[in-house]
Image (cartoon, grey):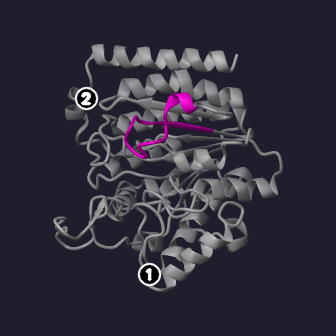
Amino acid sequence: MTTGFFHDERCLWHGGGNYAQMAPVGGLVQPIAGGGGLPEDPETKRRLVNLLRVTGLMGEMSERTARPMDRADLLRVHPASYLDAFATASEAGGGELGMRAPFGPGGYDIARLSAGLVGDALDAVMCGDLANAYALSRPPGHHCLPDRPNGFCLLANIALAVERARANRPGLRVAVLDWDVHHGNGTEAIFAADADILTVSIHQENNYPLDTGQFDTEANANLNIPLPPGAGHATYLHAMERLVLPAIRAHAPDVVIVACGLDACVLDPLGRMMATAETFAAMTAQVMGLAGDICGGRLVMAHEGGYSEVYVPFCGHAVLATMADSATVAPDPFAETFARRQPDPSFDAFVAGRIAEMAEARAARHP
């Protein structure tokens, strides 16, 4: 079996209107040269696809598209009132129904396709057609709530994929690991009362959203791991070893899904973390090893954030080369510089102390 790579050029045609980073243009907010301006633009994804083709890694994977998620499956997570409002606004030229989640003409159908990429990737892994799979989904989904889009996210891609899979496989247990730099509040909220779905979010504390993601909000099958700005390679791997992997192992899922945001990387404009392409490759290897031990290697990655046009392609390539167990690499042109920028041992030790406190508190709650 091989690694699947699910993508579709139509997802890269999603647009959000005239913004400057997170603010709509107007008043004293000047337009960005060339129009547009949302950090969530198509170029990071298109450049990743280009890099995969240039190195030849794409040819080692099963390249696929998907069918849009149909309404019956959308209704497993989103109420009809939201879907109808979204579709109507999309047909009228676009708009914004939530906070920081604008869309243009055809946005509803593009979002359905993005969700379909994740859903079909999960189905292919669950039926044994693929060893593992990566969905280059856009628009992203992990902030979206059932009745309200949020933070560039218009449909809850991972939740929709999970619910469709569970409809066909009653009793399915899933672990969702979110290493996007922002808290996966939408996925957490959707599954907060569901003991069969473990949600784990490792993120920069007090980034986005500002009112969610605290460790002390842990409830049921959920674990939040907020890390201080500046945390880098060593801290991410340590958090994985002390908190993430034990929680997933204890949950005993049938499949692991990763919300693969690449915005914890050094160059991201919306994060202040210090992860590198090596960090993402190492975390991927950690998750693959665990999945191999507990669920037959079943692993699905769904693309989330990541806004550095220069560096996201190298981080994504590192993830995919690891998933495909490939010797085809895209050497990181920034590796030496970013290694020298990593936090010093005293900072790593400080954060390790906070991680130890979280591990002890979790052990007390889940003896």
According to the picture, the residue beneath numbered tag 2 turns out to be: 339
> Is residue 145 at all visible to an observer of this figure?
yes
Q: Residue 79 in magenta?
A: no
According to the picture, the residue beneath numbered tag 1 turns out to be: 105
Q: Secondary structure at mark 2?
A: helix
Q: Residue at x 32, y 43 (%)?
A: 271
Residue sitting farthest toward the bottom: 92
Q: Quadrant of residue 74?
A: bottom right
Alpha-carbon neighbours of circle 1 within 10 Å: few (<14), some, or many (≥20)?
Answer: some
**Which one is nearer the viewer's eye here, 34 or 128?**
34
**Which one is nearer the viewer's eye here, 92 or 200?**
92
Region of the chain picked out in magenta, as a range: 199-217
**Amino acid type of disc 1?**
Pro
**Which one is nearer the viewer's eye here, 333 or 22?**
22
Q: Residue at x 69, y 26 (%)?
A: 250
Q: Residue at x 64, y 72 (%)?
A: 81
Q: Mark 1 or mark 2, which has the lower sequence index?
A: 1
The residue mark sitting in front, 1 or 2, is 1
Image coordinates for residue 234, horizontal then vertical, percent: 37, 23
Image coordinates for residue 20, horizontal then vertical, percent: 24, 63
Image coordinates for residue 215, horizontal then vertical, percent: 52, 29
- Total count of labels: 2
